[in-house]
Image (spheres, helix red, strand yellow):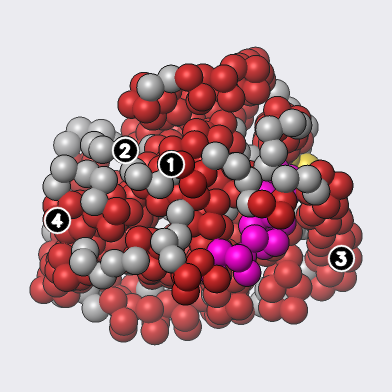
Amino acid sequence: MKTADRTEHATEPLPAQRSGHRLDLAAAGAGLLLVAVAAVVGTAIENADHTLYVHWPPLLASWYPHIGPGTWAAPVVAVAVIAYGPVLADRLRWRPLLLGCYATALAWVFSLALIDGWGRGIAERLTTKHEYLRVIGRFDDIGAALRGFNDHILIGPPGNWPAHVAGHPPGATLTFVLLDRIGLGGGGWAGVWCIATGASAAVAVLITVRALAGEHLARRAAPFLVLAPVAVWAGTSADGYFTAVAAWSIALLALAATRTVRAPAAAALGAGLLYGLTCYLSYGLVLIALPLLAVLVVGRTARPLPLFVAGALVAPAAFTLAGFEWWEAYRILVERYHQGAGGFRPYSYWVWGNLACTAIAVGPATLAGLRRAGAGAPGALRTLRTGPTAGPQALVLLVSAALLALLAADVSGMSKAETERIWQPFMLWLLPAAALLPAPGRRGWQAAQAAVALAVNHLLWTGW
């Protein structure tokens, strides 16, 4: 793979933002204030009418101080990343850096999950009454299960699907059915699958940032990608797996758009195949189309589009021919959503309470980076009209597209609570905004990221 010719544009932060440390701290403080207000107001609402359906607003969690095997491992990983991560990110050759980032992200997610122990932290998470493994036996005849899938979404008829099965297209459940078929059945293997695939999402982001914004920014983003608080939820739900599939779709499209891969046509086709699969893992991930569009805009090309579209049609064609109707399922799901907690949770709280969940999951460094991205957005937009978009401007546009997708999901009202888990595929693309932070103080920001994750996992029992 060739090095993108954009690196020379990425050696400095945005020109107008080489200072601004106080504003960075203010952005992080604003996030903390939002979380505090969401906690106070949410607790009052839940105590008064019990409509939030969470025990520790705004997170789906309960107060439960505890320790476990990961208590000793997670701080070691965090200290190692803070002490050596920036230096290694600068000095390692590119491919060893990618491998190192994957191994570190894997260690971080596993160690956080093991704070709750192997059983409660990993093996039992996907076997609860809401989760996918509860229905493996009902997919002995996959064709019949797909043809009748929509008949079991609503609460009421006999044999309705558990919440997570009903709330996702059947591609999610089929993943675990196929794992079971090849001898990797049970919660332990399912948990390992989600963590092992989910950790690769950090690598996908690094590849994308390098292709669009330059290797320098990708290297600066690396420690923040592997040490993010959102890893708390990546290790306890299938959403980490969904995140990786969506992330690799974006990464492959970036390689195709910038032609920084030996076979750009194959990359474009692969990007489409993964995006089509993404839409059959989670309905809301159709919004990944916004970061994908940003890749083409930054790359100033539509050349990959025909092959991308051809690939993206494969999964819809296969599922439709098998008897599953995506649009009809989504229509029924909206009704199911309002039959359950989604019909009672107040939109007036969650439309901003969701953002407090996001502030916790992305951490203070990302909030500071988003402040810088916001300040640089007007200039980045101007570059779209005046010339090639690269370096920090390209990163700003990519992050902005992900933020726009997240906000669209928020306004839709179909994501009320639990967004610290559900929005992982969008939050992942906010994390590289921290690369815009100046070098002085960067280790302090990384320490703050780790502290948030360790505090959440030790003090709270998270729902997923």
Q: Nearer the viewer, residue 316 or 155?
A: 316
- Circle 3 Cα neighbour tier, 10 Å, few/some/many (<14 / 14–19 / ≥20): some
Q: Which residues are magenta?
A: 357-381
**Is label 2 in a helix, a strand or a loop?**
loop
Q: Which residue is mark 1?
A: 7
Q: Main secondary structure of the magenta part?
A: helix
Badge 2 is on which residue?
3
Looking at this view, is 353 or 223 the one in front?
223
Give the SS element for disc 4. helix
Task: Name which residue type carries label 1.
Answer: Thr
**Up-down: is 284 above or below 422?**
below
Mark 4 vs 1: CB contact within 8 A: no
Give x and y (percent) for residue 131. 44, 52
Precedes in sequence: disc 4 or disc 2:
2
Q: Is residue 2 left or right of residue 117?
A: left
Query: Is the Cβ of the residue at disc 4 closer than 8 Å to that at disc 3?
Result: no
| Cβ atoms under marks 1 and 2 closer than 8 Å | yes
- Look at mark 4 in the image and give the residue it sits on: 265
Answer yes or no: is residue 168 visible: no
Q: How far is mark 4 from mark 2, CA to CA?
A: 18 Å
Q: Quadrant of residue 16?
A: bottom right
Q: CA distance from mark 4 to mark 3?
A: 51 Å
Circle on res. 41: 3
* Left or right: 316, with 248 as reference point: left
- What is the quadrant of the N terminus in the image? top left
Give amino acid for label 3: Val
